[in-house]
Amino acid sequence: MNAAADKVTVLDAMVIGAGVAGMYQLYNLRKMGLKVRAYETATGVGGTWYWNRYPGARFDSQAEIYQYWFDEEMYKSWKPSERFPAQPETEEWLNYVADRHELKKDIQFSTRIKSAHYDEETNRWNVVTDSGELINTQFLLACCGMLSAPIENRFKGQETFQGETYLTGKWPKDAKSLTGKRVAVIGTGATGIQVIQTIAPEVSSMKVFCRTPQYAIPMKNPKYSEQDWAYWCERYDETKDKVMNSFAGFDYDFTAKPWHESTEEERLAVLEKHWEEGSLSLWLASYSEIFFDEDIAEEVSEFVRNKMRQRLGNDEKLCNLLIPTKNDYTFGTHRVPLESNYLEVYLQDNVEPVDCRTTPIQEFVPEGIKTEDGTIHEFDVIILATGFDAGSGALSRIDFRGRDNRSLKDQWQQEITTAMGLQVHGYPNLFTTGAPLAPSAALCNMTTCLQYQVDWITNCIDFALKNGKKTIEVSKEVENAWVKHHDEVASKTLVVKTDSWYMGSNVEGKPRRLLSYIGGVGDYHNRCDEIAEKGYPGFKID
């Protein structure tokens, strides 16, 4: 504790983050009657939807399911303008939620958490902010986000570039116009694709530095009328039940006959149906075999490749650069992006792809980017869509210290483990959402998973308090059992055979483990429910 501080803020519970999970966690704990406060680095609520305000940022979960389910009237009163709303509307919606439930009065903005140390004598957490404020709390709820720790310093010499550099995960509110500028975009994942397809018409020229090709699905994004939203309002209970029990937390699931029980014509019909759906359903509701069977995954991959080739006019150079091959990876083992005329961008005269597999980026220079072949590419603006230290990154950037002064960051540099993504052994009264080894971000509609985790945590704390207990800590045995189960399920899939941020492969030195539980959202909920129903066996509640 910092002895120089004037006072200590004493709380029953403290929430880190005011995004989708943090806002709901604050709501629940306040409803329990606890003295609780949330702390947020940003100047407003929204989490992901505050920071990711880059050009083209939008949902890839449909508006009717990217929702809170604790207030039916709130659901029905907010009317999305389209199926996949853009970032400004989403940020507005989250402010609507915060204002409706008067959450902002209990959120301290513009505050970054530096450290959180557990005091074994008092069984409480001592937390320090970037301004030196001290907080003493019984329960600590880390709602830091699965994809909220952007990778910033990827390239040598970034500070030498004399133009504007923008990081998609921290896009400034006052970013300058890109109209008429010479622009570089580094990264062609889901975020990079949204940026590229959005700014192509306005920039003078754009070079896209391409390394890993993507299987991309065209997004169908119709506008929503009053009648459209009334349709979903009538199905509130039905939709809520579906998202909580499906494989990936969406309102669709794998329902087709097994691949080997279907004819070739039936399979093609299923794939075409989901392709025309214009959502993530081809990935998460066509054939589950794409996650397990290499031959089936390759057939589905070839289906997607053919669709992409047609749109590129079978241009051999572009197809080789932008479409994955069997040697790269199969469809569904990486994050699948939705896009709107993304491929057609490369047919424009002002757009040029740069193949980073043959000529990688060497360094940034004052004029722009130097590639390993010695070419200097000159730009006015460089946009970094270079990804995140997913799952563990946001938590590792805070100095969490548990029993015996153990460091969460140091532990996770050796091996990333949790119990259901909800607690880590050795850190009593610390609960996490969107953490590793829960179905989060990679394989779950985020509002579905985060709300369930918040509800489970809230009920666990309520159980302890009603029984006169002060501390909750998962045992090492339960944590080990969950890690073993998680790894056994993951090992049966093709996902673990690929290199992607799913496996932590995009961060040098990060331990290799599938960051998200792949057993399915419904299965995860059932397993967590069973623990709660039995009175939390394996959790030390004192």
Image (tube, rainbow, N blue to C red):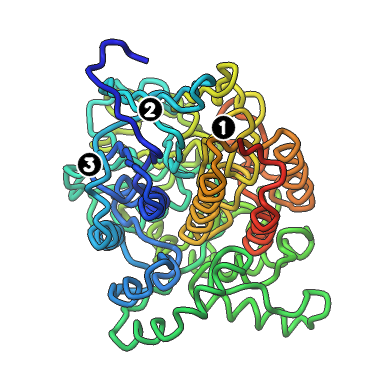
- Outermost front residue: 468
Tell me which amino acid carries mark 1: Pro
Quadrant assignment for the N terminus: top left
Local secondary structure at mark 2: strand
- Residue 174: x %, y % from top left: 16, 42
- Outermost right residue: 260
The Cα–Cα distance between marks 3 and 1, rounded to whole angstroms, is 30 Å
Tell me which amino acid carries mark 2: Asn
- Callout 1: few (<14), some (14-19), or many (20+) C-alpha neighbours within 10 Å? many
Q: Which of marks 3 and 1 is nearer the N terminus?
A: 3
Mark 2 lies on residue: 136
Q: Earlier in the sequence, mark 1 or mark 2?
A: 2
- For discs 3 and 1, the disc positioned in front in the rendered view: 1
**Are the two marked residues, 3 and 1, in contact with CB atoms closer than 8 angstroms?**
no
Q: Using residue 151 as the reference point, say whether residue 491 is left or right of it.
A: right
Q: Can residue 325 be seen in this view?
A: no
Local secondary structure at mark 3: loop
The Cα–Cα distance between marks 2 and 3, rounded to whole angstroms, is 23 Å
Q: Label for residue 506? A: none
Residue at position x 32%, y 26% in the image: 129
The Cα–Cα distance between marks 1 and 2, rounded to whole angstroms, is 14 Å
- Callout 2: few (<14), some (14-19), or many (20+) C-alpha neighbours within 10 Å? many
Q: For residue 293, what is the image quadrant?
A: bottom right
Q: Label for residue 428? A: 1
Q: Which of marks 2 and 3 is nearer the N terminus?
A: 3
Residue at position x 64%, y 69% in the image: 303
Tell me which amino acid carries mark 3: Thr
Mark 3 lies on residue: 43
- Residue 66: x %, y % from top left: 42, 65
- Residue 132: x %, y % from top left: 28, 20
